[in-house]
């Protein structure tokens, strides 16, 4: 994040497009996690990696799957998580 100073001396933060995209993807994954846990008997947690290239699916039963989402748009990321994590 870039830190800017306003005329009044207050610090403002400006997000890069990449940072905004990461926030959107994290928010979408949170919603997908809720939807999956609503319909699937095996609850899970979804976590986007710090670099945004993978999503870890951690199942309550102990299993973990890693999904490659490098370069994906938000919608493509959600599709990949569902296809690779739950339909293979």
Image: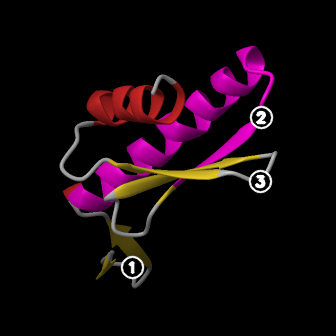
Q: Is residue 45 magenta?
A: yes
Residue in the image at 37% along x and 71% along y: 13
Indicate left or right for 4 with 86 as reference: left
Give the SS element for disc 2.
Answer: loop
Residue in the image at 41% along x and 26% along y: 83
Q: Is residue 9 magenta?
A: no
Indicate left or right for 11 with 72 as reference: right
> Is tag 1's residue or tag 2's residue first in the polypeptide sequence?
1
> Is tag 1's residue or tag 3's residue first in the polypeptide sequence?
1
Marks 3 and 2 sit apart, C-alpha to C-alpha, by 10 Å
Asked if the residue at tag 2 contacts the one at tag 3, i.e. Cβ–Cβ closer than 8 Å, the answer is no
Give the SS element for disc 1.
Answer: loop
Residue in the image at 18% along x and 49% along y: 71
Q: Residue furthest front?
A: 88
Location of residue 19 by image quarter: bottom left
Asked if the residue at tag 3 contacts the one at tag 1, i.e. Cβ–Cβ closer than 8 Å, the answer is no
Marks 1 and 2 sit apart, C-alpha to C-alpha, by 49 Å
Indicate left or right for 33 with 49 as reference: right
The span shown in magenta is 18-47
Residue 77, x across and y down, in percent: 34, 37
The quarter of the image holding the C terminus is: top left
Location of residue 4 by image quarter: bottom left
| Residue 23 numbered mark, or none | none
Disc 1: which residue = 8
Disc 2: which residue = 43
Give the SS element for disc 3.
Answer: loop
Residue 69, x across and y down, in percent: 30, 47
Disc 3: which residue = 62
Question: 79 above or below 23?
Answer: above
Residue in the image at 31% along x and 27% along y: 75
> Is tag 3's residue or tag 2's residue first in the polypeptide sequence?
2
Question: 23 above or below 2?
Answer: above
């Amino acid at each position: 994040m870039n830190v800017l100073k306003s005329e009044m001396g207050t610090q403002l933060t400006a997000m890069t497009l990449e940072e905004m995209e990461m926030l959107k993807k994290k928010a979408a994954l949170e919603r997908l996690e809720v939807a999956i846990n609503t319909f699937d008997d095996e609850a899970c947690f979804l976590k986007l990696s710090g670099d945004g290239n993978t999503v870890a699916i951690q199942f309550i039963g102990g299993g973990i799957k890693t999904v490659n989402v490098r370069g994906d748009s938000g919608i493509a990321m959600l599709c990949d998580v569902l296809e690779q994590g739950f339909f293979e």
